[in-house]
Image: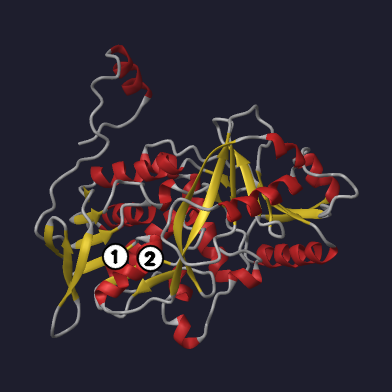
Amino acid sequence: MSERYSAFALARHALTGNRDWPQAWRSPEPKAAYDVIVIGGGGHGLATAYYLAKNHGISNVAVIEKGWIGGGNSGRNTTIVRSDYYYPASAAFFDRSVTLYEGLSRALNFNIMFSQRGTLTVAHSRGEVDFQRRLVNAMALNGIDMRTVSREECFRLCPILNCTPDARYPILGGMVQDRAGTARHDAVVWGYARAADRLGVDIIQNCAVTGIRRDPVTGAVTGVETEKGLITAPKVGIAVAGHSTVLADMAGFRLPLRSLALQAFVSEPMKPVIDMVVSSALLGVYVSQSDKGGLVIGGNADAYASYAQRGNLPSMEATLSGLIEMIPSFARVRLLRQWAGIVDYAHDSSPVLGLSPVPGLFLNCGWGGGGFKAIPAGGETTAHTIATGQPHPLIEAFSLGRFRELAMVDEATAAGIEH
């Protein structure tokens, strides 16, 4: 059993040189059978297992991860948490996620370092200002805490923005979500892993899934083949982000998703210069500053399908040129490192959640670049769907059937974002 974190425990372990801390979670060998198997040891997979045990009393669960916990997209993102979405279904889902994030440190007994520093999205034309006003009005009707700000307010919130009158892309206004912010990605993953382990969930690392077993008569899922042998379960959840189509192929059906590389960058550390997340949809860039002082920079996904996690120079140039246009003083800042995660986009840039064509197989995928902000609500709703066999009300609009019924939730068009 893992130890609870407290001020008393910190003081006690400090006296012994911090040599006696127990492992944060167990590393058991897999059992032959479980009630539920969750494929994917990132944020969504671990959150699903945690809420299965906490909310539904299903603790005979295995989380199977081909690498190490948090080694995929959960450790390769820019950690932004927000809910500025246009459609009611998207707004309700992501606002639930923000609400869960607000209480997650206490719920998991693990400091996830959630900083509600706010997000500012700048506008560069009169048309974009009008578009943002319509967005904010729609979001307000959906209960989202958005507000428009003037050009002067943008410069007050972030004084280092490009305020020159002859700028190529002048800043004319913006919109702000004050409840939004950032969290520590590793802490979110570790917190869910530790809490799930405390509730009896088995976390099995370095165990790739090589096949999905189905009943030859009913077609229902019966288990998974892994590098450590066959593991049976009547219910299996898939939460593997950019590799979702690979797992779907194993199960015998296709998903309307494409996998792209999404790059991010961290600069050398510097003194605090920006205390919120600042983005520009037109320039295709967003930036925040981490607690260590480095700028955390992201942009648009690559334009072609790929499983490469190394990134490329053209995407780097496009993102950083937009950043320098938005904040010219960053031109002389040196990059420390860059990386890429593999994200899965649906045609309408909204997730695919709920039931699959295979009985007993459940989907949590299609997040694009927005999976991190959705971890708590994604896990909660997926756990509900697995436990009850019925989609959670918050995810009914994101079912796979919407592509057949042409009931898209196109946030790329409606909110001007890709995820």
Place residue 162 in its image quadrant: top right
Who's the residue at 75% across and 48% down the image?
Answer: 325
User: Residue type at mark 2?
Assistant: Asn
Measuring from the top left, give residue 376's x and y in whole percent.
43, 54
User: Residue type at mark 1?
Assistant: Gly
Q: Residues within 10 Å of mark 2 (few under 14, many from 20)?
A: many
Q: Is residue 341 left or right of residue 91?
A: left
Residue beneath label 2, please? Answer: 364
**Residue 366 shows up from this direction:** yes
Tell which of 115 and 418 is nearer to you. 418
Measuring from the top left, give residue 342's x and y in whole percent.
44, 58
Label ID, residue 237: 1
Measuring from the top left, give residue 82's x and y in whole percent.
57, 53
Badge 2 element: strand
Whether residue 213 is situated above or below residue 338 in the rendered picture: below
Whether label 1 touches label 2, CB < 8 Å: yes
Whether residue 191 is situated above or below residue 263 in the rendered picture: above
Who's the residue at 59% across and 58% down the image?
Answer: 300
In the image as oriented, which residue stretches furthest toward the left? Answer: 32
Tell which of 282 and 415 is nearer to you. 282
Tell which of 279 and 397 is nearer to you. 279
**Residue 330 shows up from this direction:** no
Q: CA distance from mark 1 to mark 2?
A: 7 Å
Measuring from the top left, give residue 234's x and y in whole percent.
17, 69
Tell which of 118 and 228 is nearer to you. 228
Who's the residue at 29% across and 19% down the image?
Answer: 18
Place residue 52 in its image quadrant: bottom left
Q: Earlier in the sequence, mark 1 or mark 2?
A: 1
In the image as oriented, which residue stretches furthest toward the front? Answer: 313
